[in-house]
Image: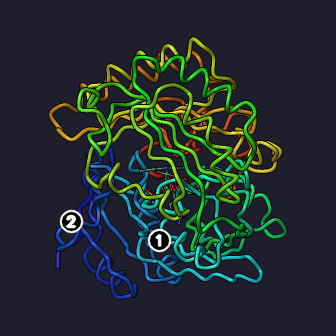
Amino acid sequence: MRGSKHHSGVGSLREIPEEEVRAFRKRMAGTVFTHDDEGYHDARQVWNGLINHYPAVVARCSGVADVVEAVDFAREHDLPVSIRGGGHNVAGTAVVDGGLVVDLSERKGIHVDPDARRARVEPGVTLGELTRETQVFGLAVPGGMAADTGVAGSTLGGGLGWIRRKYGLGIDSLRSVDVVLADGSFVRASPSDHGDLFWAIRGAGGQFGAVTSFEFDLHPVGPEIASAMVYYPGDNSREVLRAYREYTESCPDEVTTLAFHSFAPGGDGVPESARGEPALGIMACHVGPVEEGERVLRPLRELGDPLVDYSGPTTYADIHDSEGAYPHGRNYYWKSMYLDELGDDCIDLLVERASVAPSHHSSVTLWQLGGEMNRVDADDTAFPHRDAAFMLSVEATWDDPHTSSQNLDWARETWEHLWEQSDRSLYVNFPGLAADRTDLMRAAFGDHYERLAELKAEYDPTTLFRSHNGLSLAGGTTGE
Ligand SMILES: Cc1cc2nc3c(=O)[nH]c(=O)nc-3n(C[C@H](O)[C@H](O)[C@H](O)COP(=O)(O)OP(=O)(O)OC[C@H]3O[C@@H](n4cnc5c(N)ncnc54)[C@H](O)[C@@H]3O)c2cc1C
């Protein structure tokens, strides 16, 4: 067996003695992949086809003991560590070049206690898997809107789900986490135990240790719900967006909406002449009796003359279905910002930029916030964005790798233009790429940045947990 060569991230090569790699493999119950192993290339892939990182070691962990082994091995060999949950981070932060990946993707345990309305969830679970189990009891965790994304990464960055306005963010339902820290020790963090760590992990998680278990409160939802899904023609999307804004100003917390400016699909009911033309999609989810939901969502279907209207009762599980829209291996670059308000100028710019996207899979999307998620005090968790009215995401999505620079240019320019309209903060789960060299951590954590940096120095003094090149609290900026 050969030793494991790896890129250090700055182009040089180092070598881990083969007997040490061999001994590490032996200590691990799960599988260890290095460059020459069959399965290495699959193990380093993530959902985003644009990401092509080469870790020195992927340690697929079978439990807490493996996580401790992997963290100890990385520390002893001076390898930066990234952590993989569902592998869906758009920036590919789960896989660190030249370092060690603590791969938790196969940790799929879910235990639901319907009487206590609590769930224990392992970090490889996806939102779809969790929703499936909790919906047996008509319960849910408000963690994210797409079934394929990992509960782990989504929650640790905040967790904007379909019921955020009724029940808050994913982190607002988090009761405790089990964590393996940089020194290999195991702790449980909760409001009463390692409270500072628990504060930091709720919004800036991933920087402080590997979470091996999440404990969530559950909330009653569905299984049947009322939903809206309407496409309006791009010709009058400015007017429709203004009417949409008005709706969001007074709709009840039971409603959470999303507006995305993209291109009309080729699906059932879409007029031939409109297919592939700019179009505005409005989606909404209602928590509560279906009939009431249909009534409350009705105005969203009458904001103009729809191209096509797919609204109607559905299940809470089905509204998370995302595989068709976001298949594995396509190229993605998504970057966000928060808006205190949705001004007319912002609407104009959004429509203008979205309509010229080089790929028809791309969009500029408005995520309605407010309600319960904004009632939580901004200082209660590391997630500081409790006043914003919307999150806006620029989502470049394309198939042909030869058009990457065109699509990246569109997304970056669009983001730059719209950033002027924003409150200059962004969502850490839609960060663009490390190569953007945005002062990402300050933009993501605002006034909480200093405290987080202090806690990072306390819990991870050597910056072992580094995500992918530079997306770290240590140093504050991206630093590829
Ligand atoms: C199609 C799609 C739809 C999305 N929709 C939403 C949405 O509706 N709402 C929303 O809020 N976000 C959404 N996101 C963003 C998503 O929340 C992030 O991409 C998130 O990082 C994905 O989590 P993951 O576990 O799959 O990520 P991974 O790529 O596995 O991990 C990303 C990062 O999370 C941290 N992490 C993961 N697991 C652990 C762990 N066990 N311990 C410590 N740190 C860990 C690490 O820092 C890691 O680098 C969406 C993303 C995609 C691709």
Residue 248 image offset from top left, x and y in percent: 68, 33
Q: Foreground: 48 or 457?
A: 48
Q: Mark 1 highlights which residue?
A: 124
Read off the residue under disc 2. 35
Left or right of 311, for residue 105: left
Secondary structure beneath dot 1 equals loop
Can residue 439 be seen here? The reply is yes
Note whether 217 is above or below 281 in the view shown.
Answer: below
- State the residue in front, 464 or 203: 203
Indicate which disc, 1 or 2, sits on the residue closer to the N terminus.
2
Mark 1 and mark 2 residues within 8 Å of each other at the beta carbon: no
Residue in front for this viewpoint, 265 or 260: 265
Kindly identify the residue that appears in the image at 24 percent across and 26 percent down.
273
Position of the C terminus by quadrant: top left
Q: Is residue 456 visible?
A: no
Identify which residue, 101 or 446, lies in the foreground: 446
Q: In screen coordinates, is 204 left or right of 82?
A: right
Tag 2: Cα neighbours inside 10 Å, few (<14), some, or many (≥20)? some
Identify residue type, mark 1: Gly
Task: Give the crowd class for mark 1: few <14, some 14-19, many >=20 residues within 10 Å.
Answer: many
State the separation of the CA atoms marked 1 and 2: 23 Å
Q: Position of residue 36 (x, y in %)?
A: 17, 69
Residue drawn 78% across the image and 66% down it: 194
Tell me the quadrant of the picture where the N terminus can be found: bottom left
